[in-house]
Image (spheres, coloured by chain):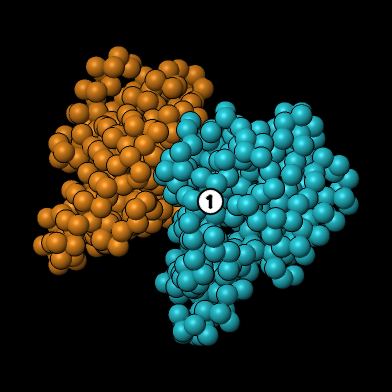
Chain colours: A cyan, B orange
Amino acid sequence: MGRAYVHGYDLRENIRLQDQAATLIELLHSDTFYPPGHSVLEAGCGVGAQTCTLAANSPGAVITSVDISYSSLCEARQRAMSAGHDNVRFLQADIFHLPHEQDSFDHIFVCFVLEHLDRPVEALRILKTYLKRGGTITVIEGDHGSTYFHPDSAAARRAIQCQVELQRRAGGNAMIGRTLYPLLKEAGYCSIHVSPRMVYVDSSRPQLVDGFTRKTFTAMIEGVRKAAIEAGIVEPDVFEQGIRDLYRTAEPDGVFCYTFFKSVALK
Amino acid sequence: MGRAYVHGYDLRENIRLQDQAATLIELLHSDTFYPPGHSVLEAGCGVGAQTCTLAANSPGAVITSVDISYSSLCEARQRAMSAGHDNVRFLQADIFHLPHEQDSFDHIFVCFVLEHLDRPVEALRILKTYLKRGGTITVIEGDHGSTYFHPDSAAARRAIQCQVELQRRAGGNAMIGRTLYPLLKEAGYCSIHVSPRMVYVDSSRPQLVDGFTRKTFTAMIEGVRKAAIEAGIVEPDVFEQGIRDLYRTAEPDGVFCYTFFKSVALK
């Protein structure tokens, strides 16, 4: 399972993820809660950007948050402890080779993980073995191909495409959000329900202008500048123009749109 | 005000609009209702695809539905009569030169009209003169740039771009949906609220697969085949491949996404 391109491995990325979670919590997670006593596997928790929200929304559930990175896991644990959550245990492990029996969990939660995998269907199949029959899987992914904005800009679209291309070369898929339904279907889940969560930003929503358009999305695209230029995917001046044009969409007459996809299915 | 490209002027288009309204009524219109006794201007009613929904949702409101086309208006009137709505009067007029006093209406409703105009801000400003102070305007528009699907296809994107380009050449803007906030702002409205209405279609929603992906969106793109090829915008084989690929998204593992934008603002 290729995980060459993984969130949360440097500080800048950590801050971005944290900002993102803070501004998107309600949109993405407010309808996820698990009953007291139920066991939940958070597969690929990274630095715990979603873990505290999970723990807070389901205080009676028993959450196991797993990541392969020791340093990410330390940060996730620290964050959960600071927030006073005592219903999460952290485990350093490959989420596809867990030290658990089959049919161990009532629920599985997977957020911003599949986008980095070269074989997402296989990943979903393996996770399914750890899920009890009748248990739920919740999958949340973004889709960079869902991005559009005003004023429109070919350079901005090129800059975004750099991120898509780099992720593709690393074995991932930055446009995976729209495919959750067929992926879960192919992996053998049933009762699949996909719920798109569109982030619409205009200047009447200043918190999202700053928190999403500028500090989450555009900051993320800016973050691939060096890699994209070194890989020869884009001319430096086109990339710079693209970044300026993305910031331009955060001006008073600008608009920015992006869609996350959230899916719940049963084993 | 250029209205060279107007919906509802031939039968095929009429059927498409009717199908569209039938499958999208809830998504687009279920939260629009006007109090008894209030006066409503439906500016650009065409063949009345939305008029019956307006009349049914607001049985006590007094609706004036205006269109410049006599034949469209006849069809709209026939449709409203068949449905038994007695709270709509129809008026053949240019919606920008109405035989009404200033400040005549409590509310204005504009749906799928601005996309065809070369000066949408001027149109909104003129409509504003007919609106009472404190009255509402509701504007609904699509945005073809919001379209994406699985499997992705460059040919399908090219075919869609034909429609965008033809509408642009006719003075319109098929990607106007995302710009409603700045347009209404520039036209001087206040308390502008934009609410995107995303149509997400996978095979768990068979009514939308057929009613939206196939019979509304793809049928609309198919409808520009002749014009696009004659204008030299696209090679015939690319267009045909694009149409096949759009129908492909309606297969069991396909996904289709499109977003309408609905906005309500005050004078």
Residue appearing at x 21%, y 22% in the figure: B78
For disc 1, the marked residue is: A123
- With B233 as the anchor, is B187 left or right in this view? right
Q: Residue at x 39, y 27 (%)?
A: B54
Classify mark 1: residues with Cα within 10 Å, few (<14), some (14-19) or many (20+). Answer: some
Q: Is residue A81 left or right of residue B138?
A: right
Q: Quadrant of residue B110?
A: top left
Residue A119 position (above or below residue B66): below
Residue B53 visible in the displayed image: yes
Q: Tell me: A61 left or right of A214.
A: right
Q: Position of residue A183 (x, y in %)?
A: 45, 46
- Looking at the rendered structure, the number of numbered marks drawn on it comes to 1
Residue type at the position of mark 1: Ala
The N terminus of chain A lies in which quarter of the figure? Answer: bottom right
Judged from the image, the secondary structure of the residue bearing numbered disc 1 is helix
* Tag 1 subunit: A
Residue beneath the point at 76% across and 34% down: A61
Indicate the position of residue A62 as horizontal and vertical percent values. 77, 37
Residue B122 to residue B7: above or below: below
Q: Name the outermost residue toward the top.
A: B84
Write down the quadrant of residue A10 in the picture. bottom right
